[in-house]
Image (cartoon, rainbow, N blue to C red):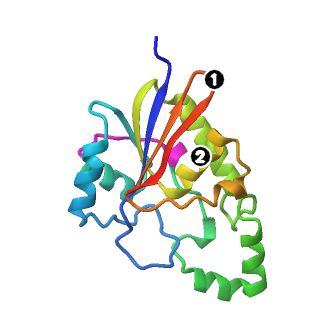
Amino acid sequence: MDRETHLWLIRHAPVDGPRGVIHAPNAPADLGDATAFAALKARLPAGAFAVCSSARRTSETAAKLGLTATEDEAFREQDFGDWTGRRHTEIERKLGAAAYRAFWQSPGTNRPPGGESFADQIARARTGLARLPAGDVVLVVHSGTIRAILAIALELAPEHALRFVIDPLSLTRIDRLENAWRVVAVNER
C-alpha cells in the first residue's frame, strides 16, 4: 500500500488590499490574474484532497482553482496578535525603531504581543500534517505555512526556514514518504 503523501502547496493569491500591512484573516484575495490561475490549475492532480486555512484569501483562491477545500486551522498564517491589521511602519513608530528591529533579529522565536512565534506555527503545522491522508493533497495556504512545512521536511531551525521566498500563486511540491521527506520544487511560478 502506498503510504506517501504528495503535497501540492499553493500560496494564496495576493491580498486585495494595501501593501505593508499584516493582513487579518478576512482580507480578500485579488483573483484577477486569470493566466496564473489557469497555469496553476493545469498542474494540479485531479481528485486530490484539498485543504485551506480559514482565511478568506485561501478559500477564495481554492475556489478559483476549482477546489472544494476543507478548512483546517492548523494551516493558518502565523498569528501576529496585536500587530494584525497594522502597517509595519505604524508598528515601528509605536514600539520605537530599536524595539521593532530587536523583534526581527530573532523572528523565528519571538512572539508579537498577543500572538505566536514562527516556531509555534511550525508546531501547529506539524499537527495538521499528521492528519493528512496518503495520496495527493493540495494545500492552499500562506507563505508562513509553506515555510513551516519546509522547516519540518528539511529539519530547519525556524530562522533558516524564513529565508525561503514564497510568492503568491506559487507552487511548492513536497512528498512525505514513510520515513523521510522529499522536496521536489519550491516557489515555482
Which numbered disc flags the more N-terminal residue, 1 or 2?
2
Magenta segment includes 73: yes
Magenta segment includes 43: no
Q: Secondary structure at mark 1?
A: loop
Which residue: 36% across, 61% down? 13
Q: Which residue is mark 1?
A: 179
Classify residue 163 by image quadrant: bottom right
State left or right for residue 169 relative to residue 111: left
Q: Residues within 10 Å of mark 2 (few under 14, many from 20)?
A: many
Where residue 188 appears, x then y in whole percent?
A: 42, 53
Q: CA distance from mark 1 to mark 2?
A: 16 Å
Q: Determine whether 31 is above or below 19 in the image.
A: above
Q: Please state the total of marks drawn on the protein image.
A: 2
Where residue 176 appears, x then y in whole percent?
A: 54, 30
Q: Which residue is mark 2?
A: 150
State left or right for residue 27 relative to residue 91: left
Which residue: 22% across, 53% down? 38
Which residue: 65% across, 42% down? 154
Q: Determine whether 76 is above or below 49 in the image.
A: below
Please state the extent of the stretch shown in magenta in the rendering: 66-75
Which residue: 34% across, 51% down? 59
